[in-house]
Every structure is written in C-alpha cells, then in structure tokens.
Image (tube, rainbow, N blue to C red):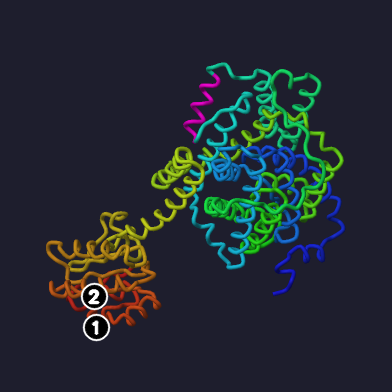
Amino acid sequence: MAAADWVPGLRAVAEYRPAWLPKDVVAGIVLTTLLVPQGMAYAELAGLPAITGLYTTILCLLAYAVFGPSRVLVLGPDSSLGPMIAAVIIPIVASDGDPAKAVALASMLGLLVGLFMTAAGALKLGFIADLLSHPTQLGYVNGLALTILIGQLPKLFGFSVDGDGLIEEATAFARGVVNGETVPAALAIGVAGLLVILLLRRFLPKVPGILIAVLGGILAVTFLGLSDDGVDVVGPLPQGFPPFTIPHIDWSDLGLLAAGALGITLVSVTDTISTASAFAERTGQEVRGNQEMIGIGAANIAAGFFQGFPVSTSGSRTAVAFTAGARSQLTGVIGAGAITLLLVLAPGLLKNLPQPMLAAVVIAASISLADVPGMRRLWRQRRTEFSLAIAAFLGVALLGVLPGIAVAVGLSVLNVFRRVWWPYRAVLGRAEGVDGYHDTREYPRAELIPGLVMFRFDAPLIFANARTFREEVRHLAHADPPPRWILVAAEPITDVDTTAADMLEDLDEELNAAGISLVFAEMKNPVREKINRYGLTRTIDPEHFYPTVEEAVAAYRSISSLPGEPAT
C-alpha cells in the first residue's frame, strides 16, 4: 500500500490547488469563531478546565489533516461525548476534585479511544457502527440531549448542584431555584446569550450567533462589572502552545477508562461514518470508513498527548466550514493556527467570558442534538421501533450515559435477533388478477389448492428460529383435512445451520409418518449445497426441490389429478 493511502495528508498536499487557498483561509477564520467557544464549553461539559478544550481542538485538527481522508470533515470536542467523558472521570476524581488528575484521566481516555479507533480501522472493523440502529441511536441522542440540558441549567442560573444522574440533578436544580440560589445577573446574561444563539440560528443561519453571544457576554462583564454581581467567569488562560504530556494514572483506574473508551469509540465511529457519508455526497468523495477511523484515532492520540480529551466529528462545524467555502483540510490547519496564536499572543482575551454563556452554548448544542420530529416519525411509521427508541432514551435518562450506551447497543442487537427469532410467516395463495402466489393476509380471497399448503418463512433458518419453523409447520399439518404437501417457498431462506438441519430431518420423518410430504421451491443454490452437505436428502426426497413455486404446484397437480392453472 502506498504511503499516501496510510497518510492521506501527503496526497492532499500533492493535489492541492492554489485557487483553493483564499477559500480555505476564509473558512478557517470563520470556523475559528465557532471552535473557540464550543471547545471551551464542551471541555467544561466533560468536567475539565476550559483551556483543555482549546488544546484538544488544536491537536485533533492538525492530526486529522495528516491522517484523515475527508477534505472537509471537522473534528473537535463534541457535545455528545462530553457527558460520556464526565461519566468516566468524575467518579474517579470526585473524592478529591483534583483538576490535574481529571485532565490526566481524560488524556488517557483520549489515548485509549485513539488506540481502539486506529486498531478498528486497521482491522477493517467499520461495521461496528451498525451496532447502533437508527431507532436506538435516536433514543440515545434524545436522552443525551435531555441529560446535557438538565446538567447545564444550574450553571445558566449561576449556581452549582451535587447530583448523580438526571433525576437527582433535576431535583437539586429545582431545590436550588426554590431556595433562592439563582444569581439574577448570571441568569440574565445566560438567557440573553441563549436567545441570541437560537434566534440567529433560526432566522439568520449565516450569522455567527455563538460568536456574537460570546463577545456580547465578554463586553457585558467587562463594562458592567457583572463579576462583582456574582457572575462566574473563565478567568485568565495559560499562555502558549499546549505542552507534550504523558498522562499518569493509577493502574486501578485503567479498567473503567477502557470500558468508557469502548463506549466512546462506538459512538464516535457511528457519528463519523454518518457525517462523512453526508458530506462525501456534497464533495464528490467516497467514504473510506476504515481510514476515517484511523484518522479519528490519530486525532485522539494527538490530543491525549497534549492534555486533551476524546474527540469526534462535528456535523455542525463541518457544515459551517463547508458553507464558508472550505476546500481542503487546510481549513482545519488555519483554525488550529488561529487558536494557537490566540493562546500565545492574547491568552487574556477570554478571561471575562461568563460561565453562564458557556452553559448557553452547550444548551443550544443540546437543543440541536435532540430530534423530536424523528421520534414522531417513528411513532407514525413503526411503533415497535418507537418503543426501542423510548427504551434507549430511558436507558440514558435514568441509568446514565455509559449504561445508556450499553442499553442502546443491547436493544439494537436484540431487535435483530427478534426479527430472526420471530420472522414474518405467510400462507400463500393465488390472488385473482395478480401473477404468482401471495400472502393470504394481504389477499383474503386468494385461492388455496386442496391438499397443498404453500408456506413462506422470511428469515434464514438457524438455531434461534428452528423451533418456530417446526411449530408453524406442525400447525399447518394438523389442519382438517390434513394437507398432502407442505410446500416451503424458500427464496427468503438465505441459510440453514446444523441445528435447523437436524430439525428438518426430524420434521420430515414426522410428516412422512403422517402421509405428508415436505417440499421446497426456489431454494438458493448455496443453501441447497448445504442441504446436500448435511445429508438431508437421505430423508427429504431429492425430487422435492423445485426451482420455482409454479413448477412445484404443477408437479403437485399432476400427481393429484387436479386441473392446471388457468391461463393469465
């Protein structure tokens, strides 16, 4: 494999067009106005110092520009990962509340996520993104949005609470409001900032609402002296480029970090593949899922070595960069460079940024994260999948973010298993005016052939549903009068495993004893080859396999002295 396949940045440099430069520079500057406040806000959402959000943003953008295959994808701290990071590190540092330990844990978490992502990409495991089905992902994201919203309300109101989980946090917040802990100046500036962000996003989407709100908050604190009225501010940031740091942790914490890293990896992979697919269509690129994971993995590793934390792709920031004219990953490099200049030349520029404004930025992100119309659509289209979404939502809201991931994955897997375990089954008949044989539930007046039952089983025949198949066929065999043939329309049966093969052998002998033949039509060649390999034709008559349902019906009519099908 060529070096450019492993390091797409080399190809990007070789293929770069000078005409792209002005657009990439402008897009990078526009993007920076979003990266700075969101990076700081999402760092605090993760329970970390705001400066680590800027460190993380710089390193992940630079690393992805080298190892990421997409020309426009933007990485950074993410609102969906923030609560997951906090869920891992806060229980470990809760006893002493040491910020340095929290940063070390988060950095190690980033390294683990990076290693898992890189390994998954190298091993071509992009399919793990399919472990979160759309309904369960929808429920998980909505639960996450509510969790983020409730968690940020105290900061918006100017006070803090101690609570473990959504219910405790909501109760503590309500208690704080009732007890008069609200800081009016903090609430005013936070709500004003939130309204600016939401209204501009709704009516003037090209105007940088977050930047305007943040600048307005800084000016208000500076000229109105709001910090004297109880409004917490970010304070001065450390000056200079983030230092290279190898995170030191206790070995006893590694298990919890690894478990959290697996959950974050799954969410990040799912988000990355979906976002990359959406923007690949607009840029004319093909999605390289495995290389995307390597690129995201490299970004996480780079952030982990510079006091950063796990990152993912950002659909909103990618959209901003794309709309601003981004043509290559130079846009991200420009953004990283601009943030570095801010830290080197003017670290005090953001010292008066009010904490309630950061809460407003996060709450706005949680509102955009939620997808209520998607839930309504599921309710209208398929109640079963709506129930799965609700269960995933409750898993996150009531059990917590990391257990919620486990619930969402478990529900996705169980939903697949359920469809295989209890697949759709149908008895077929000849419907008037329609060619072929069709489900009698859809065509209640369909003609049934005396003595012949045509049965369709819409799933591979495996250990999980072998009993279901057997019981269904037994039920058909016990009709009054009993059929002479039970014809299985086997086109949907894509596999037969050894458990199902043993069941078919026993079932065929049982039916033969009752004078009933088990017959198959339209069985795929690979499945028929397995039938032969299992030796099932010792009991099932080899003549009872027909290429089409029509030929099987004609054969039955010929041996039963029934008239043929009318011409159509």
Q: Is mark 1 on a helix, strand or loop?
A: helix
Residue 496 in view in this figure: yes
Image location of residue 512, percent across then percent down: 16, 75
Mark drawn on residue 26: none
Is residue 217 found left or right of 344 in the rendered image? left
Q: What residue type is labelled 2?
A: Glu
Query: In terms of image quadrants, where is residue 149?
Result: top right
Q: Mark 2 points at which residue?
A: 505
Residue plotted at (79% across, 25% down): 219
Q: What residue type is labelled 1?
A: Arg
Q: Is residue 92 one of those drawn in magenta? A: no
Q: Would residue 322 be found to the left or right of residue 263 on screen?
A: right
**Which range of residues does the magenta coloring cover?**
165-177
Label 2 element class: helix
Residue appearing at x 41%, y 57% in the figure = 416
Q: Is residue 73 above or below residue 545?
A: above
Residue 188, percent from left and from top: 67, 21
Instruction: Count the labels in the image.
Output: 2
Q: In which quarter of the image is the N terminus?
A: bottom right
Q: Mark 2–mark 1 contact, CB under 8 Å?
A: yes
Q: In screen coordinates, is 249 left or right of 487?
A: right
Q: Quadrant of the C terminus?
A: bottom left
As displayed, is residue 107 above or below residue 157? below
Q: Is residue 10 above or below residue 220?
A: below
At a point 32% along the width and 61% down the height, the residue shown is 438
Instruction: Give the image location of residue 440, x and y in percent.
Output: 28, 57
- Dominant SS type (magenta): helix
Could you tell whether 23 is left or right of 546 in the image? right
Q: Mark 1 points at which residue?
A: 538
Which is nearer the N-term, disc 2 or disc 1?
2
Residue 181: name its quadrant. top right
